[in-house]
Amino acid sequence: MAQFGFENDIHSILKLDMPITNAPMARWQRKASSSNTSGLSGLSPGKSANASMSSSKTPSKTPGKNKKQTPNKMGGDRFIPTRNSKQMDVASFLLTKENEPVDTNNASGTAESQKAWSMSLNGFNMEDAKILHLGGKPLNAPEGYQNNLKVLYSQGTTPASVKKTRYISSTPDRILDAPELRNDFYLNLFDWSSRNVLAVALHNSVYLWDASQGEITLLMKLEGEEDYVCSLSWTKEGSYLAIGTSDCKVQLWDVDNQKRLRSMSSHTARVGTLSWNEHVLSSGSRSGHIHHHDVRVAEHHIGTLTAHSQEVCGLTWSPDGRYLASGGNDNLVCVWPRVQEGGNISQSVRCWSEHQGAVKALAWCPWQPNILASGGGTSDRHIRIWNVNSGSCISSLDTQSQISSLVFAPNYKELVSAHGYAHNNVVIWKYPSLTKVAELNGHEDRVLSLTMSPDCSTIATVAGDETIRLWKSFEVDPVKKKAKERMIKPTSSVIHQSIR
């Protein structure tokens, strides 16, 4: 009986008819109380809305782990992420922009700016580089793309495949007759002035050809039939022409008035080469001597250079007027300093003997004043590039042909050489690599000399076949040409004093 009484007491306790006073609050009751509390706090003016948010925070400790502590705040069973105000502003902006109408003008401007940025950063438009494209012409591959399968899927040329070399015509732009031209390797028989006038010596006469107008003028003729003109050289401004003759004289002519200003005699043999440096005219003779003439004074002979043992056939001043380069039939190349007032110069700065033939071809580099190019005759056939400051030979090239003349082409930084036996042609070389760019063939005899036009776009060559050929091989872009013309200032005459 006692056992049945104990079981009845247990069943009565488990019926839970009476509320448990010490038990925790049920979950549904906690939810109801929290919702009521948040609603009242939101409506009450005296309390801030932060109270409801703080009451919903998750407790720092889990109630199940520590039975002695009960949760301080309600609603700790969910995680609600917090978002800062910047994120909400961005989201609101994107939602509002989504419903706005598209501005076509602004869209086109954005597309143009994106295209410009793509061209600047990548070298091509990213839109044009898409492999998959609906409609339109076949598109270009991105720059630098290499297709190992060699599949041709583009019709246009990519920026990487565009050839940077220009077109050089293999035929001359113009051919002029030069009857009675003296076929002598050691003479310098024509020159192109800064006024675009080409002077050429035909036996004992000098003719002028205006390249702009096409007019031909007979400037002078020597009195003796057995005499002949050996060399020509224009002044920098193109108003005066120096003429060396076989009777050992140097004549100075005023081209505008077609008048001979003076005849200077100091050499003992023919004058085969001339070069100007402001008011000083340097002349090279068959005797091996080089004379300096100050054309402003009566006593014109102001200096003599003696280093060559045979005829001086090459003579040219550097663009900055610091050095005079001379080449002779004795295979020597000499470099002389600037002419000093009131004293003779007998010591050369440099003297090279590497050439194995006569050195007539000499050219100074316009953009590197300390660089000199020289070319040897039939026994040598080499182009050599010298550094005057260090005295070293920078490079040497065997052209397999006699070299009669050299000139630098500044428009494309190239070197042009004229050749006699055995090729009788003109070759354009890339500087400083001396790789061949083009060959200009057409002369039927050895090319004796070449000269550059004042705009550096055309070279003129004269040969033993009694023809002058003009090759327009160095034309520049018209935009660059106009910019260059604006930078060129008119030069004034250096021969401004009366010559007694």
Image (cartoon, rainbow, N blue to C red):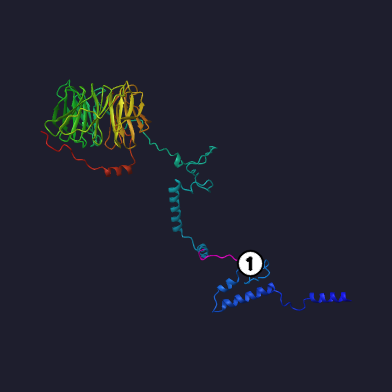
Where is the C terminus found, in terms of image quarters? Answer: top left
Q: Position of residue 456 (x, y in %)?
A: 29, 36
Where residue 23 sits, quadrant-wise, is bottom right
In the figure, 109 relative to 345: above or below? below
Where residue 299 sits, quadrant-wise, is top left
Q: Position of residue 216 (x, y in %)?
A: 21, 32
Q: Dot 1: few (<14), some (14–19), or many (≥20) neighbours within 10 Å? A: few
Q: Which residue is mark 1?
A: 61
Q: Position of residue 273 (x, y in %)?
A: 22, 27
Q: Position of residue 167 (x, y in %)?
A: 38, 35
Where residue 313 sits, quadrant-wise, is top left
* Residue found farthest to the left: 500
* Residue found farthest to the right: 1
Q: Is residue 243 visible?
A: yes
User: For the magenta stretch, what is the residue range?
Assistant: 79-86
Side of 332 where 279 appears, left or right: left
Q: Nearer the viewer, residue 136 or 423?
A: 423
Whether residue 165 appears in magenta in the rendering, the answer is no
Q: Amino acid at mark 1?
A: Lys
Where is the N terminus found, in terms of image quarters? Answer: bottom right
Side of 121 where 387 appears, left or right: left
Q: Is residue 463 visible?
A: no
Side of 363 where 264 appears, left or right: left
Specify the principal SS of the magenta part: loop
Whether residue 80 appears in magenta in the rendering, the answer is yes
Q: Nearer the viewer, residue 285 or 43?
A: 43
- Secondary structure type for disc 1: loop
